[in-house]
Amino acid sequence: IPVTYPTTAPELALPELDGKTAKMYRGGKICLSDHFKPLWARNVPKFGIAHAMALGVII
């Protein structure tokens, strides 16, 4: 978890989803720059790590 959490999105990795969605996952990590970072920025401070993990599974 970054020092500036919750304003900075944490780096999330879901190894079991590696390679299933090429656009979102690179080595099991969620692509923060294009996809997750804007979503996190819109929803701070009501977003939590559990929300992020749930969205990673849904997207």
Image (tube, rainbow, N blue to C red):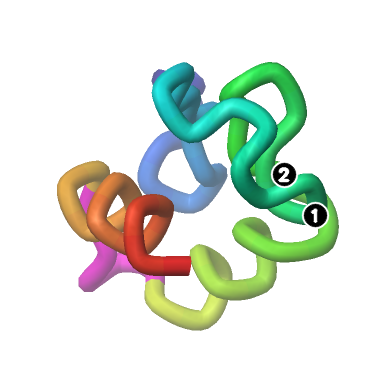
Q: Which element carries disc 1, helix, strand or loop?
A: loop
> Is label 1 in contact with label 2 (beta carbons under 8 Å)?
yes
Q: Nearer the viewer, residue 6 or 59?
A: 59
Q: Where does the image place residue 20, in percent across and percent down from the top left? A: 61, 42
Query: Residue 24 vs residue 11: left or right?
Result: right
Q: Which residue is mark 1?
A: 23
Residue at 41% across / 53% down in the picture?
56
Residue at 25% across / 43% down in the picture?
49
What amino acid is found at the position of numbered circle 1 in the picture? Lys
Looking at the image, is 9 positioned above or below residue 15? Answer: below
Sequence-wise, the earlier of marks 1 and 2 is 1
Span of residues in magenta: 44-48
Looking at the image, is 12 positioned above or below residue 23? Answer: above
Label drawn at residue 41? none
What amino acid is found at the position of numbered circle 2 in the picture? Cys
Query: Residue 32 vs residue 39: left or right?
Result: right
Q: Where does the image place residue 29, in percent across and percent down from the top left? A: 61, 28
28 part of magenta stretch = no
Q: Which residue is mark 2?
A: 31
Q: Where does the image place residue 12, in percent across and percent down from the top left? A: 47, 30
The rendered magenta stretch, by its main secondary structure, is classed as loop
Q: Where does the image place residue 15, in percent across and percent down from the top left? A: 47, 18
Residue at 82% across / 61% down in the picture?
34
Query: Residue 46 vs residue 27: left or right?
Result: left
